[in-house]
């Protein structure tokens, strides 16, 4: 398992993404999620990518990506990642 704690701009080319089988994006940032997904699309072949947040957020991230292959997103990106604990607001989730 490898944990990458960097922004997508700093990781492009420095981090070997070629051998990633699965990823969970936990940036809490729409722009970074879209950039990471674009990097994974171009440099890797993950079978599973977990994305935090509701399905409406997934659509927003997909629209922000710089790829035209919508079927790739539908096939590889799953979510919401994590456990459904029934919380709606940050206080109840914490």
Image: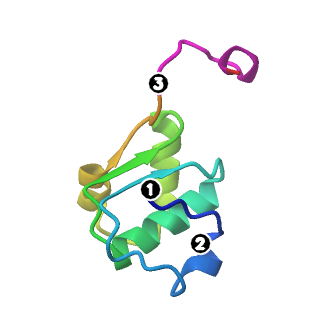
* Image location of residue 92, percent across then percent down: 69, 14
In this view of the protein, which residue sits in the foreground, 38 or 91?
91
Label 2 residue SS = helix
Q: Quadrant of the N terminus?
A: bottom left
Magenta stretch: residue 6 in it? no
Label 1 residue SS = helix
Residue contact between numbered discs 1 and 2, judged by CB atoms under 8 Å: no
* Image location of residue 50, percent across then percent down: 41, 46
Q: Nearer the viewer, mark 1 or mark 3?
A: 3
Q: Please name the residue shown 61% across and 62% down the image.
A: 32
| The magenta segment | 83-93
Residue at the disc numbered 3: 83
Residue at the disc numbered 1: 62
For this orientation, the residue located farthest to the front is: 1
Question: On the picture, is 32 further left or further right than 48?
Answer: right
Disc 1/disc 2 C-alpha distance (Å) = 16 Å
Q: Can you tell which mark lies on residue 8?
A: 2
């Amino acid at each position: 398992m490898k944990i990458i704690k960097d922004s997508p701009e700093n990781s492009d080319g420095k981090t070997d993404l070629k051998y990633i089988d699965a990823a969970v994006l936990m940036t809490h940032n729409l722009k970074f999620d879209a950039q990471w997904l674009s990097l994974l699309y171009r440099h890797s072949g993950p079978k599973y990518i977990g994305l935090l947040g509701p399905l409406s957020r997934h659509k927003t991230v997909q629209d922000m990506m710089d790829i035209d292959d919508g079927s790739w997103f539908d096939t590889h990106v799953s979510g919401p990642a994590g456990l459904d604990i029934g919380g709606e607001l940050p206080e109840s989730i914490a």
